[in-house]
């Protein structure tokens, strides 16, 4: 009889040198935004081959900056996905705009470009897509639609750091790309985010807006120990601290190791769960490489499935509920048939640095035994 285990859905991965690095920062006069943040930004750009990136305190703040920079405001509409964390869609409300939910693909959980086409109106000012579980969306198709209507694509890549699309890092394919370094993400800074951009003008605005509208590089010190500057635009307190950046910098060193491990564990799921009664696997793409924040399957009798796994010490999760369930976003929609199908069946399985081969094989064994 196989011994019962305790396998959590998520587990933060912190490299051994983080404690010493943070202790060093805490002994310095600068624990807020400073050179450590600059180093973290530079390291991310090098790792993903990016040109423009600003570190911020959450991925939601990154999305808010993107919406603000591209001029989304009261009365505007933003086409977005309901299959995501609420962090994706709250910024739309913060801009006093209206989220318009697009349907998703049954075999990926990602936004369906064909449905996006049907929902664009003269009021649409941006498209936000989320890479569900770390699997990139159909970015070429979404960006073609966006260009036809002269609006930007904003990628919520909170779960897709290190993923690739057509051989290019996520971060290089759309005008704005938001990353997350929250506690359970592949690379954690305990909390934090970043906004990648393709245009120097967007980058300049993002740097100023993340720090209360102050041009920290352009301001000049005066004899009073203060600075001479003007504030000409609305800004926010979205900056990252040196403490968070130090954590992120150390953990970023584990990127290659984490990707290798997660790909290896995912390969076991792909192979061993194929053709299991009651289980439907999502689509594997030859033109993109997921980051595998978790592994998604569709199951019949989901409640029974989860009870069975919980009894075996395995803790799966739906991770994110469909956002139209929440009254703040307007309540349940009846025009999202694929979302209805997907949201009643999907479940996330653990896939992180704390799940080894024995753990994944144990999960597969329990699933194959039925529920």
Image (cartoon, rainbow, N blue to C red):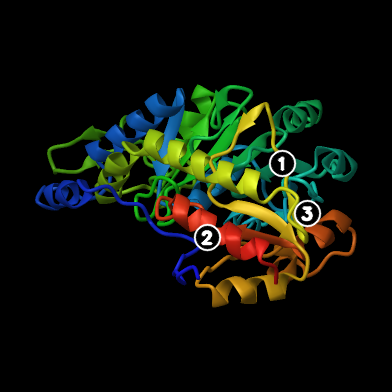
- Above or below, 201 against 320 in this view is above
Give x and y (percent) for residue 254.
34, 39
Q: Work out how far the residue at label 3 is from the one at label 2, CA to CA, in angstroms.
A: 38 Å
- Discs 1/2, front: 2
The numbered mark, 1 or 3, whose residue comes first in the sequence reads: 3
State the image quarter where residue 308 is shown.
bottom right
Q: Are marks 3 and 2 in contact (CB under 8 Å)?
A: no
Q: Which residue occupies 20% across, 46% down?
A: 17
Query: Which residue is identified by label 2?
Result: 362
Query: Which residue is identified by label 3?
Result: 101
> Which class describes the residues within 10 Å of circle 1: few (<14), some (14-19), or many (20+)?
many
- Above or below, 140 against 85 in this view is above
Residue nearest the observer in this picture, 303 or 225: 303
Q: In the orientation shown, which residue stands out farthest toward the left?
A: 27
- Discs 3/2, front: 2
Q: Secondary structure at mark 2?
A: helix
The numbered mark, 3 or 2, whose residue comes first in the sequence reads: 3
């Amino acid at each position: 009889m196989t011994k019962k285990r305790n396998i959590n859905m998520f587990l933060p991965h912190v490299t051994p040198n983080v404690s010493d690095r943070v202790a060093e920062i805490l002994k310095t006069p600068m624990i807020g935004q400073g050179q450590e943040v600059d180093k973290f930004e530079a390291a991310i750009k090098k790792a993903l081959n990016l040109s423009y990136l600003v570190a911020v305190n959450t991925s939601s703040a990154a999305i808010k900056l993107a919406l603000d920079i591209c001029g989304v405001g009261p009365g505007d509409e933003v086409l977005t996905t309901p299959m995501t964390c609420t962090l994706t869609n709250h910024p739309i409300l913060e801009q006093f705009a209206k989220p318009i939910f697009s349907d998703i693909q049954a075999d990926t959980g990602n936004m369906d470009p064909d449905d996006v086409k049907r929902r664009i109106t003269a009021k649409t000012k941006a498209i936000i897509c989320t890479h569900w579980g770390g699997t990139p969306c159909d970015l070429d198709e979404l960006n073609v639609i966006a260009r036809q209507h002269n609006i930007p694509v904003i990628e919520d890549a909170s779960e897709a750091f290190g993923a690739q699309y057509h051989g290019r890092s996520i971060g290089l394919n759309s005008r704005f790309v938001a990353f997350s370094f929250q506690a359970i993400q592949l690379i954690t800074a305990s909390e934090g985010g970043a906004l990648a951009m393709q245009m120097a003008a967007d980058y300049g605005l993002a740097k100023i807006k993340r720090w209360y509208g102050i041009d920290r590089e352009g301001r000049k010190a005066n004899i009073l120990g203060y600075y001479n500057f003007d504030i000409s635009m609305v800004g926010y307190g979205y900056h990252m601290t040196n403490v968070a950046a130090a954590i992120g910098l150390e953990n970023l060193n584990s990127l290659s190791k984490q990707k290798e491990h997660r790909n290896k564990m995912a390969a076991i799921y792909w192979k061993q769960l194929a053709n299991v009664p009651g289980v439907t696997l999502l689509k594997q793409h030859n033109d993109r490489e997921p980051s595998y924040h978790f592994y998604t399957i569709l199951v019949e009798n989901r409640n029974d499935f989860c009870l069975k796994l919980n009894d075996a010490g395995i803790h799966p999760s739906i991770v994110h509920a469909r956002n139209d369930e929440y009254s703040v976003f307007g309540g349940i929609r009846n025009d999202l048939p694929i979302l209805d199908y997907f949201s009643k069946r999907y479940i996330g399985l653990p896939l992180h640095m704390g799940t080894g081969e024995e753990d994944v094989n144990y999960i597969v064994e329990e699933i194959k035994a039925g529920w």
